[in-house]
Amino acid sequence: EVQLVESGGGLIQPGGSLRLSCAASGFTVSSNYMSWVRQAPGKGLEWVSVIYSGGSTYYADSVKGRFTISRDNSKNTLYLQMNSLRAEDTAVYYCARFRLQLWLRSGWFDPWGQGTLVTVSS
Amino acid sequence: SSELTQDPAVSVALGQTVRITCQGDSLRSYYASWYQQKPGQAPVLVIYGKNNRPSGIPDRFSGSSSGNTASLTITGAQAEDEADYYCNSRDSSGNHRGVFGGGTKLTVL
């Protein structure tokens, strides 16, 4: 079964750091594109970051320079290192596999993890 | 533009057909994917590509696209379809970023 399980969320003070983990089973993280998507309380989905199978990484402007996406191939796990956290980073963070088929002009997220809540507050 | 626009709320009578739309410049060159999210749950993919349903998604869900508008149609809406629906596309500016619509709350009456 293809599955993603996030962990690492919690309460953190503004300016602090946190690392989220996303353990994958049923497929190989390093052979796929992997993303983080977040959802602030009561709000919509916001794309955060992607790492391609080749290692290229891309970020939303709102987190660029503060967040780093990475993976550990030996653990089949995706990470999101979050530094200089702000109140507006408070959200449920989801990891998801991103499938991209440019020749079909298509991309989609499947599966998704259950999410982990990050609360930035003093 | 990297924005996708959705109506905040739509309602449909039980058993009737409803269309949820998503507008954005990137949709002229890239198909939208659609996600269903129920309260307290993670999003679930319901439509991707030109009009593809993942395994387990009922065939009452379908997708279409014209110009800068993508549509998700539910033919014969059921009570369990009441949820938030989000469209997603790739930023057409070539910066490899993704973008989501603001979401549509579907109420089944």
Image: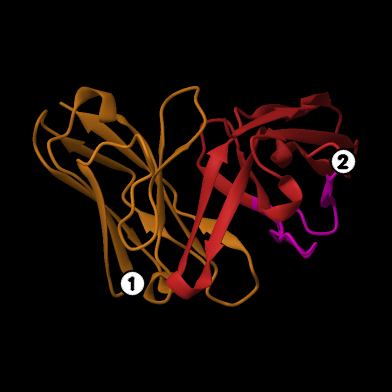
Chain colours: A red, B orange
On the picture, is A67 further left or further right than B21?
right
Question: In the rendered structure, which amino acid carries the disc numbered 2?
Answer: Ser
On the picture, is A87 further left or further right than B7?
right
Q: Is residue A38 above or below residue A69?
A: above
Cα separation between marks 2 and 1: 42 Å
Which residue appears at 49% of the width and 25% of the height?
B41
Question: In the rendered structure, which amino acid carries the disc numbered 1?
Answer: Asn
Give the residue number, with chain letter if any, for mark 2. A74
On the picture, is B29 further left or further right than B60?
right
Location of the C terminus of chain A (image quadrant): top right
Picture quadrant of residue B80: top left
Residue B43 at x, y percent in the picture? 48, 36
Residue B98 at x, y percent in the picture? 57, 60
Which residue appears at 64% of the width and 68% of the height?
B96
- Residue A51 within the segment the image draws in magenta: yes
Front position in the image: B45 or A104: A104
Picture quadrant of residue A61: bottom right
Which residue appears at 33% of the width and 53% of the height?
B52
Regarding residue B1, the answer to whether it shows in the image is no
Front position in the image: B40 or A26: A26
Regarding residue B33, the answer to whether it shows in the image is yes
Q: Which mark is residue B68?
A: 1
What is the secondary structure assignment of the residue under circle 1?
loop
Q: Chain of mark 2?
A: A
Segment colored magenta: A48-73
- The reply to whether callout 2 and callout 1 are in contact (CB within 8 Å) is no
- Residue A82 within the segment the image draws in magenta: no
Q: Is residue A18 above or below residue B62?
A: above
What is the secondary structure assignment of the residue under circle 2?
loop
Which residue appears at 29% of the width and 75% of the height?
B67
Q: Which mark is residue A60?
A: none
